[in-house]
Structure formats: C-alpha cells, structure tokens
Amino acid sequence: MKKYDVAVIGGGFAGAAAAFAAAREGASVIIVDKSNCLGGAAVNALVHPFMRFSAKIDGKEVDLSAGLFTDILQGLAKSGSADRHKFLEEELKFLLNDMAEEYGVDLLFHSYLFKTNVTNGRIDSVSLATRAGVIDLEADLFIDATGDAQLAYLAGCPTVLGRDPDRLCQPMTLCFRLGNVDVERFWKSRPELARAHAESLAAGELINPRENILVFKTPVPNVLHFNTTRVVKKDPTDPVDLTRAEIIARKQVREIYEFMKKHADGLENSFLMMTAPEIGVRESRMIVGEYLLTEKDCLATTKFEDAIAACNYAIDIHNPEGTGTSIYNFEEGTYYTIPYRCLIPKGVSNVLVAGRCISSDHGAQASYRIMPTVCSIGEAAGVAAGIAVKDGVSVREISVKKLQDTLKANNAFIGI
Ligand SMILES: Cc1cc2nc3c(=O)[nH]c(=O)nc-3n(C[C@H](O)[C@H](O)[C@H](O)COP(=O)(O)OP(=O)(O)OC[C@H]3O[C@@H](n4cnc5c(N)ncnc54)[C@H](O)[C@@H]3O)c2cc1C
C-alpha cells in the first residue's frame, strides 16, 4: 500500500470531516473503517436526529457547527432529508462517499485496526486485519476518529474510561425502527402509554431501566425511530461486555415492542423494521491530552484562546447505573468552545484525536459528543493535520492562528 500524508482511522462524522479537511489542505488522505460505509454511529448505530447545534446570538440564530457540517446539511437537503435535524442515513452514506471522491480521499473499508507500530514516540504504521490478511498502512500523521480512542490506546497513550470515581460510562442503546405505524394515532396515545409505562416500571415488571419511551418521527412516512433501550454498567471496550450488551438490548427491544402493542394505538399493522447494525456507544475511552476539557469549563461557557469548535448542546447524562437522565440546558445565546489541545494525545508525536473521545471529563463529553459538534472537531483535526504536513512541523508545533484562520475562511464557527 502507498504511504499517505494522513491516515484517518474511523469514518464517522469526525473522521469523514477530518479527512475532507486534510485533503482540502492538499494532503494525501485515506480513511480506514471496519464497516462498509462512512457515517459511523449515524449509520452503524442508527443514531438520529442531529441534536441542537445553533444559538440565538444578538437576536440571530447562528450555527455553532458550520463549515463542512453545513455542506453535509446542504447535501442532505438536496437528497430530500426532511429538515436540519432529521436525515435519511442511506442518503448520508451516498453523500459522504461522493464527498470523499470530490476531495480525492481514498477509502479502505472492511479493515480493522488492531496494532500500531511505534518508534521513538512516533507511529510509523498501523496494522489492519483484512480479508487479505494483515495490511500495514504507513502515514506521516494519523487521526484517531474511532470513537473509542482505539489508535491512541494501542499506541500506548494514556486514556481514561467513563466517569470519576467508578469509571462507569453512559449506557449503551440499541436503536430500532418500527414500520407501517399509524403515526398520528400512536402520537395521540403517548400520554396513556407513558402512564402505563411508569406503572410497569415502578412495579418492577420491565428489564429495561429507562425512565420513559424515547421515540422520534423520521422523514419516512409511517416509520418511527426508538432510542430507548438502556444497558448499564457494561464496559463498551470489553468484547465480552459488549456482546452481553447486544444480547440484553435485543431482549429489551422485544419487551418494549410487545409492551407498546398492548398500551399504544396505531401499531396494529406495524412490524419491527430493523434494529441498528450495532449497539450505540455514547461514551467509552477518552484520551489524556494536552488539555482536559471539564464540565466546569462548559458550565462557565469558557472561550479558549486555541478554540477550534463551539457547542451549546445540553450536558445530557443518561444514568450509567439505571433509571433517570440528568439534563443541564445552557442559557439561550451562550456556548463554550473546545481547545485544540484536547485533540493532542500525550505519549505520541504524530497523532491527533477527533470525535467523542477527545481529552475531556465525563460531563463535558456528555455535551460535545453530538454529531454536529464532532463533525466540527473533525474538521479542525483535518485542517491541523494538513497544516502540519504543509509546514513540515509536528501537530504540537503548528500555528494555531493559521488553524483558526483557515477554519474561519472555510465558514466554520469557532466562537472567537
Ligand atoms: C444511542 C445513541 C444516541 C445518540 N443520540 C444522538 C442524537 O440524537 N443526536 C446527535 O447528534 N448525537 C447523538 N449521539 C451521539 C453521536 O451519535 C456520537 O457521539 C457521534 O456520532 C460520534 O461520532 P464519531 O465520529 O466520534 O464516532 P463514530 O461515529 O462512532 O465513528 C467511529 C468510526 O470508527 C470505526 N472504527 C472504530 N474502531 C475501529 C477499528 N479498530 N478499526 C477500523 N475502524 C474502526 C467505526 O466503524 C466507526 O465508523 C448518540 C449516540 C448514541 C450511542
């Protein structure tokens, strides 16, 4: 395989944006993913819709995730996705493939990163498990967009799992869709469904500890999206726990569907259309980077000098132990920023991290983890990598001013 300037491991929103941005800066770029498409959790875990990514500033609604995220929204709108928040994941897969082609980004699917080859604190190559056996991929710079900080972890960088002090992560959720639903009648019966659900939960009749039934309309007529299973106290980075989580969540899907058929209207002719290809992981490993973004920073709506992205999505913590969700909503018009230093892992010199596994604590991650924000973080990582390659310097030595100016020139919002 040819050697690349930049190899991005993981093709979710963070990885795709990172790759497009690095290629836009003139770098030769490849995205490696274990699945068969780009989109990450949006397609592999059926995560839907985009959570809030704008703020009313001086009376005007401003997109805090702009830049490449705006381009993606516009592409989705062209293909018929209903609005700024709902989208069709099949269209997202087409769109991201097309964008990769336009930016000249190479793709390598069905390839699983399992090893890094490090010399003197620098990753020379990564080893991928493929149907052709092991492939070693060389690059000058690597971007870890695996969601689980898999590359950083394998390279021996320090990482942390979940919250202090018990290291529990937010629950995992297997999303599912019901088809042929009479949506109007279902929606009208939600109060009665909620009452019955609260009663059964209190009586200890349900295996799913979630406090309510979380359901969304989709752009597809007669199809409902459920983000309502909840698997707690499992480690998403442990394959045995992860398998157990898939099994428990699937039981919960059956339980909820049977329950709703008894207590809601509009499901008489419905069917279970699909469960997500894999269980959704809200939180797992995070790197220990040059700066640790904290919940306190977010609450203080801190604006960092080396800001590369902005966010005001709620600190939305699904109880890692069972029932309940704690939500802190930011005051209208306020937001915090994310510093570039959070993308730089300790322990290696030629790696950046993008997405839900940057350097932060549990509370901060509960906010910036949404798809629009990780897309902005990814774009920043890509621009930084592109600058490092062009200027022949390390990711720690790049001009942050140049990074910020380039992001702004490309219509990103970084809050300063
Ligand atoms: C249940 C659930 C509900 C959520 N709800 C919402 C919501 O309503 N709105 C919202 O905006 N956000 C929501 N989120 C958050 C959001 O979906 C994720 O945090 C975000 O998509 C993460 O993006 P990412 O690019 O960092 O990682 P991912 O999207 O997870 O991408 C990581 C990619 O890396 C690949 N990969 C991983 N390991 C390897 C490896 N070893 N080798 C090769 N490839 C690898 C994976 O296949 C994947 O494509 C939700 C998350 C979950 C789990």
Image (cartoon, rainbow, N blue to C red):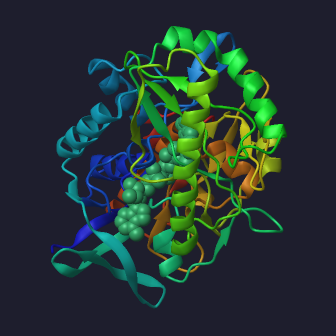
Residue 168 place in picture, x, y as percent: 73, 63
- The tally of labels here is 0
| Residue at x-position 51% and y-position 51% | 250
Q: Can residue 382 be seen by looking at this rendering?
A: yes
| Residue drawn where x is 68% and y is 54% of the image | 170
Q: In this orientation, which residue lies closer to the viewer: 17 or 315?
A: 315
In the image, residue 398 sits, relative to residue 288, either above or below, namely above
Q: Pick whichever, 254 or 125, lies toward us.
A: 254
- Rendered-image quadrant of the C terminus: top right
Residue 384 at least partly seen? no
Q: Nearer the viewer, residue 257 or 404?
A: 257
Instruction: Indicate the quadrant containing the N terminus: top left, top right, bottom left or bottom right.
Output: bottom left
* As drawn, 237 above or below 37: below
- In percent of width and height, residue 271 lies at 40, 30
> In which quarter of the view is residue 300 placed?
top right
Q: Residue furthest bottom?
A: 120
Taking depth in this image into account, of 271 and 389 the one nearest to the observer is 271
Residue 387: give x, y in percent of width and height. 39, 57
Q: Residue at left 69%, top 13%?
A: 58
Q: Is residue 165 left or right of residue 371?
A: right
- Vertical relation: 288 (above or below) 206: below
- Residue at 42% across / 45% down in the picture? 276
Q: Position of residue 403 (x, y in %)?
A: 48, 49
